[in-house]
Amino acid sequence: MTRFLQDILRQPDELLRVIDHLNGTERKLLESAADVIRSARHVYVTGIGASWNAALSAGSIFHAGGLPVYMLDAAELLQFSKIPSDATILVLSRSGRSIEIVKLLAKARAAGATVIGVTNFEDGPLAKEAEIPLVIPVKADHGISVNTYSALAVAAASIASAAVSSFDEDIAAALSSTVAETAKSITEWRDLLADTSWLLPGVPYYFMARGSSLASAYEAGLLWEEGAKLPATAMGTGSFRHGPQEVMMKDVRIAIWIDGEQMRDQDLAVAHDLRDLGASVMLTGHDLPKDAADLIFQLPRSPVHWQFLTDVIPAQLAAERLAQLAGVDCDSFRFASYIVEDDYGLQTGGSTSSTRMESKVSET
């Protein structure tokens, strides 16, 4: 069994602990963060890598609740945005020490902005320097972000929920019930993946969703790239209908997350037409028609805007299975660092190392 799979299989238990943590130990800090956001004139939500994907779920809840926020990944916010002095920035980062996050903290401090940090490790700069730090402890993943991703997504979404309406014991209980019901399906999902033709190395993959599940679609693309070492494209289902469908041909693989409340019929029609055009389609959602796709993952009902809570798990399992089929090691990174702490290039010690050293000397 791969370490990646081990991390996925322990995810329901970790999620239950995170929900209890947010509704217990971190409840006061969560409410404080929500109060600060409600009173702020400008609110930014940011992260980088998997943490940015996790931030998308919170953004969806903010917008659905009528509290508009600026969604920018940390590199763009750092390099191409002027931060107003009366801004509040909700920053997500697993380690809290990625180069963009560390520099963004300094930029926010210089601007007089308030930082709310959501992180997994209490010893990182984000936990130490944020005005309101929410540390969501989970056992670190071996390589690919699984539990750390989910913990950040749930924590940020809980802050958003508290800011636009509430995050109370009833919501926490409903979320825990969803996780517990999802856990019962994991063995069945693994059996489906062991016997499906939807997973095929070397073909194009597209991941599409709406609302909070956009977080899962973008995270699935990253899982394909990090785990199976294969390219993938993620986007909104609506955006796909405005041109990208021109790429359709035999053997293209499409994954669509069907929202529990909105655009169900329309997106099921998209899935139907894609199959007619020769694509092989995977659907993830609640109460889906049994003949609607080539591969279907049925989810338990979740609270409105919270389907992302568990709907990424089938994609995680699929990425791990595809890595096996492709004959690649999903437990190690060939080029990526677990934490990116340098601004330059891709490879440490590579051809740009002298350029980095010269730059560091000139900066000191």
Image (tube, rainbow, N blue to C red):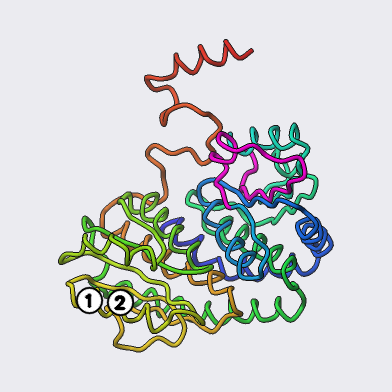
Three-letter residue code for mark 1 = Arg
Measured from the top left, where is residue 296 in percent x and y? 35, 79
Q: Quadrant of residue 98?
A: top right
Task: Point out the image quarter for the C terminus.
Answer: top right
Residue at image position (32%, 63%) is: 242
Measured from the top left, where is residue 33 in percent x and y? 78, 57
Q: Is residue 215 left or right of residue 92?
A: left
Residue at image position (64%, 37%) is: 82
Q: Which residues are magenta?
A: 71-98
Establish if 174 lies above or below 278.
below
Marks 1 and 2 sit apart, C-alpha to C-alpha, by: 6 Å
Seen from the viewer's position, the closer of residues 118 and 79 is 79
> Label 1, on which residue?
275
Q: Residues within 10 Å of mark 2 (few under 14, many from 20)?
A: many
Measured from the top left, where is residue 237 in percent x and y? 39, 68
Measured from the top left, where is residue 20 in percent x and y? 73, 70
Seen from the viewer's position, the closer of residues 236 and 85 is 85
Residue 84 is a magenta residue: yes
Three-letter residue code for mark 2 = Ala
Q: Secondary structure at mark 1?
A: helix
Q: Residues within 10 Å of mark 1 (few under 14, many from 20)?
A: many
Find out whether the residues at labels 1 and 2 contact each other: C-beta distance under 8 Å. yes
Q: Secondary structure at mark 2?
A: helix
Establish if 155 lies above or below 344.
below
Q: Is residue 343 left or right of residue 192?
A: right
Q: Which mark is residue 271?
A: 2
Q: Is residue 198 left or right of residue 58?
A: left
Establish if 320 lies above or below 343.
below
Residue at image position (41%, 64%) is: 236
